[in-house]
Amino acid sequence: MSANEEETRFLYLSTVLKDIGVSKGVILLRRNPHLTEELLFTAQVRLDGYDNDLFIFGSQSEGTATI
């Protein structure tokens, strides 16, 4: 695939995502609650005396979208 074809596909995908309402703002809106939840759960675990971190994985916490 040439650089021009790759750029064309990127621009098309960007247009489609914009048309269905996916933007940086939406991604941050989806990501931030999960990051806050990780922080709060980790704080609770630490307050309970454990030296562990909690992580949430998946498309919701990453703020990604599937078409």
Image (cartoon, grey):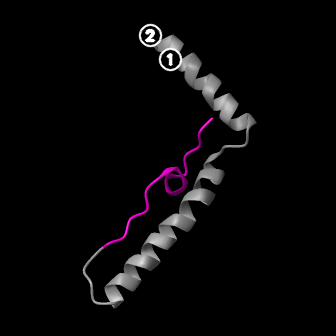
The residue carrying mark 1 is 6
| Label 1 environment density (alpha carbons within 10 Å; few <14, some 14–19, many ≥20) | few
**In the displayed structure image, the side of residue 28 where residue 1 appears, left or right:** left
What main secondary structure does the magenta stretch of the protein show?
loop
| Residue at mark 2 to residue at mark 1: CA–CA distance | 7 Å
Is residue 64 covered in magenta? yes
Residue at the spot 28% in from the left edge and 75% down from the top edge? 52
Compared to residue 67, the image places residue 7 above or below, namely above
| Mark 2 or mark 1, earlier in chain | 2
Q: Which mark is residue 1?
A: 2
Amino acid under label 1? Glu
Residue at the spot 56% in from the left edge and 24% down from the top edge? 10
Place of residue 60 in the rendered image (x, y in percent of width and height, measured from the top left): 55, 54
Q: Which mark is residue 55?
A: none
Compared to residue 29, the image places residue 13 above or below, namely above
Compared to residue 25, the image places residue 2 above or below, namely above
Place of residue 50 in the rendered image (x, y in percent of width and height, measured from the top left): 27, 84
**Hey, which residue is sitting farthest left in the picture?**
51
Amino acid under label 2? Met
Q: Quadrant of the N terminus?
A: top left
